[in-house]
Image: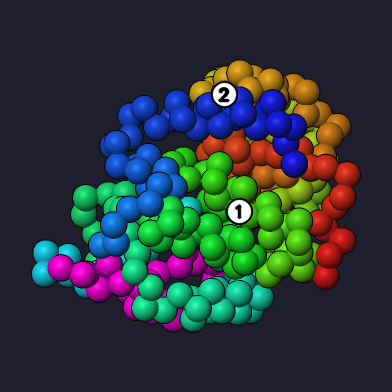
Amino acid sequence: MLPAARFVTLSSLVVALLAAQPSRAMDACVGDPAAPTHRLEEALPLPTGTVRPVVELTGLQPAQPAATILIEGVILPARAGETARTAYSDVMADLHDTLVVFTPSADTPDRHSRLHGTIRFSDGDSLGERLLAAGAGLADVAFTPCATRFLAAEAGARAEKRGIWRQSRIWTDLNAAATNLPDYVLGRGKVASIGRSGRTTYINFGGNFRTDATVRLREAMTSALVAAGQSPDSLSGRVVEVRGWANRRDGLDMELESPLALRLPGGTSDLTTD
């Protein structure tokens, strides 16, 4: 895990990123008790591939109609296979018919008529945290309002080897040829070099830029890492973990979306789990 002082610094960066967000974004993860707005009905069937969980809610008042909700901040990666789906189904079965608080993160539905947001329980805990604590998925740190809370929930499952953390295939080896891209990737590898072109910094995981994995940092992200005491220049020769949506541009190509998407692993490797 990140050292405590560094984790606090990164957390302050996440808070800063919320300055331009609607105030209700922070309300999604404050964790305080609140009056229920909906009833949790059921989880919709999960399609194949990497997905975000989608659930059905019914309103408790006429002004709160039934809605299909895409849960922000949680991703069920295809690499986890049936392990993630089983953990997800178990959590959702236990929570059927529970009263919840829905906080939208956008004013309008997406093109599939789904509202996006978070779902909390009356005690302040959230559905996203329950899923991550069960090892049913990965925290999407690009959803900044809940990033630190969701990573903490994920860390508990990771430490206890629950759900997806019981298997090694959840990981992508950044020092090997990547397959099945584009996809959401949780990757680990030894940094070969740090490069720059214009305002972009490149974390390279091999010497052949046409075939090896690369993580790109825009100028603002580089500055955020430096402010957090983790200069990209200090990463050369070190093993790092990154997460995010990766494409194939010859090799694996990923743009870091948050300082929390990069982690220096501890001494115990999750790659050895099975």
Does residue 221 appear to the left or right of 170 in the view shown?
left
Where residue 200 appears, as percent x and y from the top left, is: 58, 26
Where residue 7 appears, as percent x and y from the top left, is: 65, 32
C-alpha span from label 2 to label 1: 24 Å
User: Residue at the location (27% across, 49% down)?
Assistant: 106
Q: Is residue 44 found inside the magenta-colored segment of the image?
A: yes
Q: Secondary structure at mark 2?
A: helix
| Whether residue 186 is situated above or below residue 230 in the rendered picture | below
What mark, if any, has residue 153 been given in the picture?
1
> Label 1 amino acid?
Ala
The mark closer to the camera, 2 or 1, is: 1
Q: Is residue 152 found inside the magenta-colored segment of the image?
A: no
> Label 2 amino acid?
Ala
Does residue 4 appear to the left or right of 239 in the view shown?
left
Where residue 39 appears, as percent x and y from the top left, is: 30, 72
Please state, as top left, top right, bottom left or bottom right, where the C terminus lies in the image. bottom right
| Whether residue 57 is situated above or below residue 24 in the rendered picture | below
User: Residue at the location (70% across, 39% down)?
Assistant: 263
Where residue 44 appears, as percent x and y from the top left, is: 40, 78
Specify start and end residues of the magenta stretch as a single range: 38-61
User: Of 241 and 149, which appears nearest the observer?
Assistant: 149
User: Residue at the location (76% across, 64% down)?
Assistant: 161
What mark, if any, has residue 224 been given in the picture?
2
Q: Is residue 171 visible?
A: no
Does residue 62 appear to the left or right of 245 in the view shown?
left
Q: Secondary structure at mark 1?
A: helix
Q: Is residue 232 visible?
A: yes
